[in-house]
Image: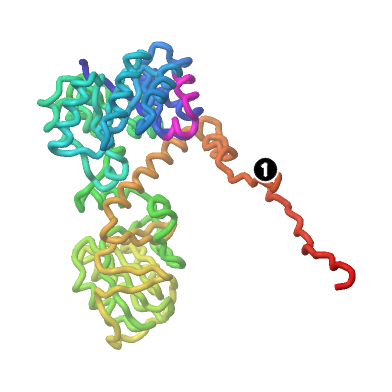
Amino acid sequence: MEPTLQVALDFLELSRALGVAREAAKGGATWIEAGTPLLKSEGLEAVRALRREFPKAYVIADTKTLDAGRTEFEAAAKAGANCATVCVTESDATILECIEAGRNFGIDVCVDLLGLKGERLIEVAKKCEEWGAHHVGLHLPIDDQMRGLDVTAELRALRPHVTIPIAVAGGVNSESAPAMIKAGAQIVIVGGAITKSADAAGATRTILKAIREGKAVASDLYKRGSSDAEIRAILEKVSTPNLSDAMHRSGDLPGIQLQTPGKKIVGPAVTVRTFPGDWAKPVEAIDVAKPGEVIIVDACGQGPAIWGELASESCMQRKLAGIVIDGAIRDIDTIRAIGFPAASKLVTPTAGEPKGFGEINVTIRIGGVQISPGDWIVADESGVVRIPRAKVVEVANRAQDVLEHENRLREEIRRKATLGSVAELHRWEKHIVDELGKGNGNAPAKVEPSAPTRKSKSKGR
């Protein structure tokens, strides 16, 4: 089988999925997948729409069937799919039923080997080939992608044991696709690197060329990091709103603003607890911090200033990434002139005194957010966020995913649309159902309070 590109349309809105599918088809894609989110949102109408629009395409319904295999594969086939997917469970019955249904209704079967590793992976894949599966899929779930994992090792281990095609999915882009083909995949399933691109047709052409020529094409986005250097590069690229979204709308340190426009603060935290106006421990922390780290100070959110020009000059000598203060800073005009990134709650000309109270590298709390040494701090002109050290890889990768999604949305809006129309907000609003079970749009149901029930008293009582 020649190297094949499969474009995964993991949208919730059919209109957006069709728009990207049209662009991908212009770029040369012939395998088009109705992704699981699309099927859950729009049902098999998504497959019917793809078949109507692309009568010659190979259409995959990513049903991820776990039960009722015959019913689901019959429905997918009758909707126009060339192929549907079944997931491995402890029982083989559903896979066998899907393969039998595939023979009966003329639809190919892809067995998704989701979650399998080692000998179990090889054992199941070999059985699927014996039973008659069209191909098997190595699928790295998106939540594992965000933790910096990949499936290359599993692909290399599996390839010698089966002769049917192997599909690979999970964060594949123009850099990694040729390596996947070289490692033994025949089908590369690409989602975000195409569907989140402002130019899906161009992205499709680039990936097709990469897999056909076996040469990687550098990609700035659509890949996930795991090393400290990769994570820092991502955090320098994304915004604090991206990060807050990635942390389920949390993580910000309220009331603290970047005081040096155009600068950005990114780095692990050296924490300081001090008293208002006591600048001894914050300045001592400069000699404790390592290059690339951020000093973050709990100064009780009050003045006088515990930081100024000379401390900032010292940080620049030490190559520190910035200062964040829940309290006051001064000399801000000079700090801006020398280009040292600084964020604070207050600005004042009045300095405090070095009394030496407080601690360095202890857990502190700012605005209700607990910050431990080594947690990552990111500040830009939208605000300041803290990322727990244990989750920085996942949060950074999820923030980049948010940025990538926004890039595509921005392009769709610029094509003379609006955010509300592109996201089809009206479809996702909460609708109230009144007491009679009839929907009444978005307006709250008006329920009159019922009068207390009174039991009539019988005569003579």
How many numbered circles are shown? 1
Q: Is residue 172 visible?
A: no
Residue 175 at x, y percent in the picture: 22, 32
On screen, residue 384 versus residue 185, left or right, reads: right
Residue 323 at x, y percent in the picture: 32, 67
On screen, residue 326 versus residue 294, left or right, reads: right
Describe the colour scheme in one phrase: rainbow
Image quarter hosting the C terminus = bottom right
224, 61: nearer the viewer: 61
| Callout 1 secondary element | loop
Q: Which residues are magenta?
A: 37-50
195, 80: nearer the viewer: 80
- Going by the numbered disc 1, the residue's amino acid type is Gly
Determine whether 218 is above or below 19 in the image.
Answer: below
In reply to whether residue 44 is colored magenta, the answer given is yes
Residue 139 at x, y percent in the picture: 26, 34
Residue 430 at x, y percent in the picture: 59, 46
Seen at 19% across and 50% down, the residue is 227
- For label 1, the residue is 437
Looking at the image, the residue that sits furthest to the bottom is: 355
Q: Quadrant of residue 311?
A: bottom left
Determine whether 426 is above or below 167 in the image.
Answer: below
In reply to whether residue 24 is colored magenta, the answer given is no
Image quarter hosting the N terminus = top left
Seen at 55% across and 41% down, the residue is 428
Determine whether 276 is above or below 248 in the image.
Answer: below
Looking at the image, the residue that sits furthest to the top is: 56
Q: Is residue 340 visible?
A: yes
Q: Quadrant of residue 136?
A: top left
- Kindly report the secondary structure that dominates the magenta region of the rendered protein: helix
> Quick one: label 1, few (<14), some, or many (20+) residues within 10 Å?
few
